[in-house]
Image (tube, rainbow, N blue to C red):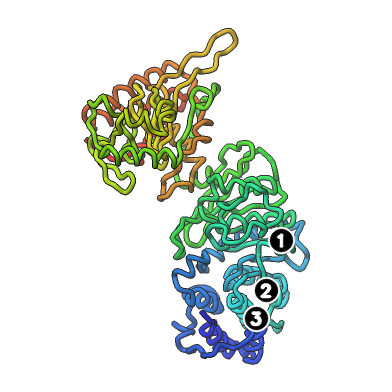
Amino acid sequence: MDGAGVLAAALVLAERSGAPESTVLAEYRRLLGDLPTRRGDPSTAVRADGGVDVGPPELLLGRLCEDRLEPGERRRRGSWYTPWPLASGLVRFAIGALDGRCVPGSGPTVHDPAVGGGVFLLAAAEILVADRHPDVVVGLLSGTDLDPIAVFAARMSLWFWNRRQGGSAPPPRGIRVADGLSAPDSHDLVVGNPPFGGRLRGPTVLPDTKPEAGAYTDLAGLFLLSSLRRTRPGGVVAMIQPTSVLASRDGEPVRSEAAARGRTIGIWRGERVFTAQVDVCAPVVAVGRGSGSRESSPITILGGPDAEVVGMVSPESEPGDTLWPRAVARAGGVPEPAMVVAGPTLGEVAVVSADFRDQYYGLVDLLDGSHGDGHPGDDESVAVVTVGLIDPLRDLTPVRTTRLGKVVRNRPRVGLAALSESRLARWAAARMVPKVLVASQTRVVEALADPDGSILPCTPVVSVVPGVEPGTGSTPGHRTGVWHLAALLVSPPATAWLAARATGTGLSAGAFRVRCGQLRELPLPTDRDRWDRAADLARRSQSAVSGREARSLLLQVGRTMCSAYGITTTETSELMAWWEDRLPPVRD
């Protein structure tokens, strides 16, 4: 894993630019101590007449930095090469968003805390040199990395770029070996593609991090958190992130920091444009502008491999909301219809809860002890339902097997006698009540009514148990029935509302995670008569014998719930088309 190939390419580029070979070797020794024991083959290092298809030829050194790492080592480090078009597009947008009143006369300082081969700094240099001498431009750039070979590549890239532009400054010392999370300096623009992955470092890596930014906050999120704190007012932060930062619970400290320190002005909605097997995005935050404001402001949506402007969205603001997931959702085609909601939320009329691993493994043990299979009419056992057996208002148990405890099971059931004597007895009693069962990973909300309390949910199925709706004045509240909750949960408005707030949380493209906290915040419709009608349709849909009949009734539930929310005819048509396209196939 030495830098022989990187050094060989640097020597070739030095010869092409007329740079002294002695300086290249001295920089290598300064950063790595000794020259490599073997010298890389220049003809292999400098491939395809420079090694790059687009962008400046100095990008070659960054490419070689990535190529020298084996795939397993690259995944362990969470380090991935950023394509030139993406880096260039993000940097161009970010520089254009700087507040000129706050930028020094010499130009904005640009920093990359995980500099790698220097692609983002090269992108900044190409833009800033339009009205500055290249020596001045290089002096505005800085970066850090823990990999000395990457630092060598970044220094040499910018040095060769400077010489090609007519500059004479020495290799930039602003790029150094250091931990990008703990450096104390401040900048006008912070950009980059930091390493992804779990917290590979100790808990003291970012001393002023909020306590809740703990072991499960992605390392890339910590880089964004740190960058927001080290960027001067009037500056901008633009940083590639895993899409989990948009809405996941562990990304909340990052989103809160962004909302407190500035205003989100743009977001690259993300594509798999590099070799990391993870969906990514890039929020762009203007620091010090509109910080803490609840007013809605347009957000520029960037898209494609070159981060071009593809549109603007203006989602309605909510307290403490960065709007990241809703902006990306809107850009991805998720409707956000105007809903008439003046009443309580789901959490005020129902108990929404999820179970834990203890219940999962307890059920597996009971299933293994009873051979795990049964018959629907068996009064001495109770059915177990997994997320894979739930479609909207459709129990797939009769037509699909499920895997539990590494065993494929058909119609899984557990004996009531064994259950009553197990450690799950109290939990089972609390779950064997009328309720609605909700799948946790989905493209639409998939919910199944259990009006008799005859089904046990298997983790991570979410349970929604009816409660009493709050009264008004002297009017007492009334219980919201299971079928009302089922109609609400499978409705297009519920799916759109949740999808807009949970973009990026699913394990597959287009899917989202149904979280208890967000379900509790789901607003209820105000038109009770139409909701009553939808509840009856939901009951008929789930009772239908054929899949086609069930689907026809489900679509009627959807349209009726749109009316219950007061959604206009035009927006209902748009919402229904989007929702129908995401529904699972009809299954008989």
Which three-letter amino acid code belongs to the residue tagged 3? Leu
Distance from Cα at disc 3 to Cα at disc 1: 27 Å
Residue 297 in which image quadrant: top right
Which image quadrant for residue 489? Answer: top left
Indicate the amino acid at tag 2: Arg
Q: Nearer the viewer, residue 128 or 376?
A: 376
Check disc 3 and report its element: helix, strand or loop. helix
Instruction: Pinpoint residue 88: horizontal percent, then vertical percent.
Output: 56, 66
- The residue that label 1 is drawn on is 188
Image coordinates of residue 129 in percent, x first then y, are 66, 72
Residue at x 66% of width, y 62% of height: 181
Give the distance between the C-alpha atoms of the residues marked 1 and 2, in whole angstroms: 19 Å
Q: Which mark is residue 31?
A: 3
Q: What is the three-letter code of the residue carrying label 1? A: Asp
- Residue 283 vs 378, above or below: the answer is below
- Find disc 2 in the rendering and name its residue: 176
The answer to which of marks 3 and 2 sits earlier in the sequence is 3
Q: Secondary structure at mark 2?
A: strand
Is 177 rendered above or below residue 180?
Answer: below
Identify which residue, 532 or 29, lies in the foreground: 29
Question: Residue placed at 58% from the left, 62% from the top?
Answer: 194
Mark seen at residue 214:
none
Q: Quadrant of residue 485?
A: top left
Q: Is residue 334 visible?
A: no
Residue 536 visible, this angle: yes
Mark 3 or mark 1, whichever is nearer to me: 3
Q: Nearer the viewer, mark 1 or mark 2?
A: 2
Q: Earlier in the sequence, mark 1 or mark 2?
A: 2
| Foreground pick, 26 / 299 | 26
Q: Is residue 61 left or right of residue 209?
A: left
Q: Is residue 182 left or right of residue 373?
A: right
